[in-house]
Image (cartoon, rainbow, N blue to C red):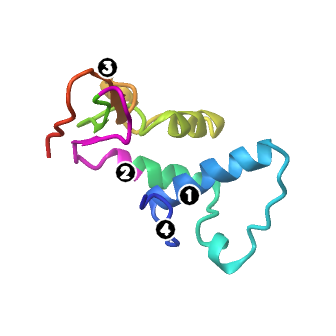
Amino acid sequence: QGALWLRPAADSCLSFAMLRDFLEQCGTKLDCGKSLARALDVSPDQLAAMLNEELLRDAPTTRCCHCTGSATTIERNQTALYLNRYHESLLKSLKMNSPLHELGNEVLYLLDFSVSHGSCSPSL
């Protein structure tokens, strides 16, 4: 899918953190000291900084989901308070505000789903 490459970028580190957190919550013990995992296992502060930087990047897009029965798309809005729910939760756990909290943005998440029952025709 391209969201978990072995390079320390926002998308890979976010995917790694979400998978790591899920596995640890299920009782799985992980050894993140191995060379491949170490680069992706960044601190919460580092991850927050990476996600905040991604949030500020103006790159709205729409793309189709792998979904049957509806024309569900993944939309990257032009601006929002948080990248996604994980970003919101991470910032709150670190007692940090969104870098865009003073703008009073009505859109909560930069990445969101849109469900319709027509055909999928994303805008590029």
- Badge 3 element: loop
Q: Which residue is mark 1?
A: 46
Res 34 quadrant in image: bottom right
Boundaries of the magenta span: 53-70
Residue 71 percent location from the top left of the image = 28, 29
103 up-or-down from 99: above or below: above
C-alpha separation, residue under disc 3 versus residue under disc 4: 32 Å
Q: Which residue is mark 2?
A: 54
- The residue positioned 42% from the left and 61% from the top of the image is 2
Residue 88 percent location from the top left of the image = 52, 34
Q: Amino acid at mark 2?
A: Glu
Q: Which residue is mark 4?
A: 5
Q: Are marks 3 and 1 in contact (CB under 8 Å)?
A: no
Numbered disc in front, either 4 or 2: 4
Precedes in sequence: disc 4 or disc 1: 4
- The residue positioned 26% from the left and 35% from the top of the image is 77
